[in-house]
Amino acid sequence: MRRKPQRILVIDDEPDMCWALENILRPTGYAVTTTTTGTEALELLAGGPYTVAFVDVKLPDMDGLELAAAIRQRSPHTAVVLISGYYYQEDRTITERLQDAHFIGFISKPFDLDEVRLMARQAVERAREENHAKDPSSGGG
């Protein structure tokens, strides 16, 4: 029996960035959905769970950090990875939010293809572990 591909949601205000992330992740076997607004991302999440959400910090309709928190609140099983060309791993805002578990990882733009694939793999594993810990009857994967 084949497993359904893990669903990944990419939210970035730049359509080219959505296209790039989709074309990095889809060939590795993920089902990728993209959007350019936080509002649409929340609507997509309401339609069904995603394993991972890649969230850009700067969106036209809402702050990406707020969106990351909203995603975790509405869909606790979704692992959030923040992407940004404005912040860097060492920024205080990023380190504080990582500690608060608003997101599980951070990638700065411009990013490396292998870094994106690795982060997706780690996020899927983390989400799987969290789901198994919350529902031991799931039988693991």
Image: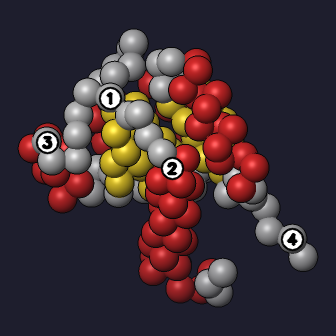
Residue contact between numbered discs 3 and 4, judged by CB atoms under 8 Å = no
* Residue at screen point 34% across, 48% down: 106
The CA distance from mark 3 to mark 2 is 20 Å
Q: Earlier in the sequence, mark 1 or mark 3?
A: 1
Q: Is the residue marked by circle 3 packed among few (<14), some (14-19), or many (20+) residues within 10 Å? A: few
Q: Earlier in the sequence, mark 3 or mark 2?
A: 3
Cα–Cα span, label 1 and label 4: 37 Å
Q: Position of residue 65 (x, y in %)?
A: 28, 35
Q: Is residue 7 above or below residue 138?
A: above
The residues tagged by marks 1 and 3 sit, at their Cα atoms, a distance apart of 12 Å
- Which of the pair 74/99 is nearer the observer? 99
Q: Circle 1 sits on which residue?
A: 85
Give the residue number, with chain letter if any, for mark 4.
2
Precedes in sequence: disc 2 or disc 4: 4
Q: Nearer the viewer, mark 2 or mark 4?
A: 2
Q: Amino acid at mark 2?
A: Val
Amino acid marked by disc 1? Gly
Q: Earlier in the sequence, mark 2 or mark 1?
A: 1
Q: Dot 4: few (<14), some (14–19), or many (≥20) neighbours within 10 Å? A: few
Three-letter code, disc 3: Asp
Give the position of the C terminus as an image quadrant. Answer: bottom right
Task: Name the amino acid, label 4.
Answer: Arg
State the SS at label 4: loop
